[in-house]
Image (tube, rainbow, N blue to C red):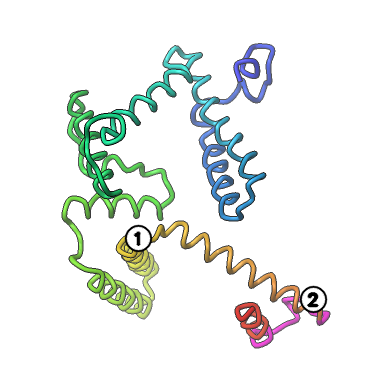
Amino acid sequence: MARLRAPDGCPWDREQDFDSIKKYTLEETYEVLDAIDRRDWRDLCEELGDFLLQAVFYAQMAQEDGKFTIGDALDAINEKLIRRHPHVFGTGDAKTADQVKTRWDEIKAEEKRARAEKPKGLLDGVPRAMPALVEAQQISSKAAGAGFDWPEIGQVADKVREELAELEEAQAKAGSDEIEAELGDLLFTIVNLARFLKVDPEQALRRTNAKFRKRFGHVERGLAVRGRSLAESNLEEMEALWQEAKSE
């Protein structure tokens, strides 16, 4: 990367800055997740290389600006892992994953106090730039950790039904802004339901997306065998093929 960024290196690489490659970082992240979902280990190996390149790219630009090096970044994560796992590297005690997470958050708060950082709101540490589904998952988890949560899952399910009713009411009024707001409330509540069920909503949705792709592909192939296209078909015919795919 240093060679690519050199004066006689690659014009494209030299032109990049921290902001211009953010989109590639996001793209590579999703390609890693896709390879994992497909259980394509060969592709995952390649995608992890692309993913690691993003860290190298940022670190090289930081080194050029005299901010830090890739070695500094690796030292920082090594030290953090040791510091936040006292039950492994020290004399701490944690028997369950929940105990580990609680202690991790406590140590993180201690670190911030030691750096004399300005106190922030509980949710300020959740980046706004992340995908909305992941953001909802993180902010709801933080709020729940502070005690702002439903006592049991049945109440969350009731809230889902309540939000669905409010969405239907907004739809009846034909107000687009209100419909969007109520749909957002419904999605946020479903994320909370996923948290109670200990299901990652992002991965659950990705799994459903993959399932839909597979079944819809069966519909297309089934129509092609009959010499028909999607445009030439009707809903009943497509639904029959969909149910066929589902049963298989």
Dot 2: what SS? helix
| Count of numbered badges drawn on the protein | 2
At label 2, the amino acid type is: Ala
Residue at screen point 20% across, 60% down: 149
Q: Is label 2 or label 1 in front? A: 1
Question: Which x, y percent locates residue 199?
Answer: 39, 61
How crowded pointer 2 is (Cα within 10 Å; few <14, some 14-19, many 20+) is rated as few
At label 1, the amino acid type is: Lys
Whether residue 233 is in magenta: the answer is: yes
Nearer to us in this view, 173 or 118: 118
Q: Is residue 102 left or right of residue 214?
A: left
Q: Is residue 184 above or below residue 124?
A: below
Which label was assigned to residue 198? 1
Q: Quadrant of residue 188?
A: bottom left
Nearer to us in this view, 235 or 206: 206
Residue highlighted by disc 2:
224
Residue at screen point 28% across, 55% down: 140
Whether residue 54 is in magenta: the answer is: no
Q: Which quadrant of the rendered structure holds the N terminus? A: top right
Residue at screen point 18% across, 66% down: 151
Question: Which x, y percent locates residue 198?
Answer: 35, 60
Mark 2 vs mark 1: which is more N-terminal?
1
